[in-house]
Amino acid sequence: MLIITGASGQLGRKVVNNLLHHVPAERIGISVRDPETVSDLKAAGVRVRQGDYGDADSLRFAWQGAERLLLVSSNAAATGGDPLKQHATAIAVARELRVERVLYTSQVASSPTSQFPPGRDHAATEKMLADSNLRWTALRHGFYAASALAMNARAFQAGELIAPEDGKVAWTTHDDLAAADAALLAGDVVIDGPTPPLTGSQTLDLGELAELASEIVGRPVARVLASEHEMETRLRNADVPPGAIGVAMDYYRAARAGEFAAVDDTLAKILGRPPVTMDTFLKANLR
């Protein structure tokens, strides 16, 4: 069985859909907190079981027969939880079940010294995997293109993108990353340890994104620099939760430091085509 965790999420579901082009549905198992959210996949012949990173017994059942496992990184930090504790539980269960290979969705900013908190969590999880005696692959994803839209959609519509100084980012689509993840999970491509950066070929900062948005919406979108203090005040006044404000500010700092700017051709080689560019993504998704 090829097991995918978090298959009800944006990335996980796309991985399942891609994996169906590599192997029969009966070889695919998915692990989700609420099986009702993926009833369509069950109808397609995919094995659906309830599994929660906080419940080791549920994972033992959900991952039964796993040959390879795609461990989608936990988003527990967004609700005050501990993603590293959840990852440790998941890795321990994978060892018990003697999973042949664990593939973990990491990120290009993975480093113990990253200014981006998820980057430090990814580095810590990669170390857990390295110490586990399991075969493992850390899928070092580029920064999601959808995040650029989510973070700046209001600014694109308002015509003013106000933010602190940032830096170049190799924005990468969920679709491209899901296709690559599926190929690696199926064993069509094998990479041990951390992959090279799985990124698009185009790096853009917020000013360049604003220019692209201007062309697409047909009106100017100005890039306005703000101090970090000014930005924090704006976010607080918009009732953004304190945790989300902290992550946003750390994003700007990490981007300035070039943590998201690496570009590599590995993703294109796995896909057999160039990755989708940010202008193509925005044209399809910016309304």
Image (tube, rainbow, N blue to C red):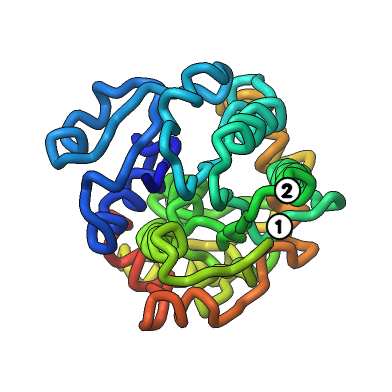
Q: Could you tell me if residue 227 is visible in this image?
A: no
From this viewpoint, which residue is outermost toward the right?
113
Q: Give the mark nearest the N terminus, 2 or 1.
A: 1
Residue 275, located in which quarter of the rendered image?
bottom left
The image position of residue 265, as x and y in percent, is: 54, 82
Numbered disc in front, either 2 or 1? 2
Q: Nearer the viewer, residue 87 or 243?
A: 87
User: Which amino acid, by three-letter code, is at mark 1?
Assistant: Ala
Q: Tell me the quarter of the image containing the N terminus.
A: top left
Q: Tell me the quarter of the image containing the C terminus.
A: bottom left
When the figure is inspected, residue 226 is found, relative to residue 86, above or below; the finding is below
Q: Residue at 49% x, 45% y: name it.
A: 69
Q: Nearer the viewer, residue 206 or 196?
A: 196
Q: Secondary structure at mark 1?
A: loop
The image position of residue 18, as x and y in percent, is: 29, 58
Left or right, 192 with reference to 43: right
From this viewpoint, which residue is outermost toward the left?
43
Residue position for label 2: 133
When the figure is inspected, residue 131 is found, relative to residue 244, above or below; the finding is below
Residue position for label 1: 109
When the figure is inspected, residue 25 is found, relative to residue 267, above or below; the finding is above
Residue 237, located in which quarter of the rendered image?
top right
The image position of residue 284, as x and y in percent, is: 27, 63
Q: Residue at 61% x, 58% y: name it.
A: 137
Left or right, 197 with reference to 120: left
**Residues under labels 2 and 1: Cα distance?**
24 Å
User: Which amino acid, by three-letter code, is at mark 2?
Assistant: Asn
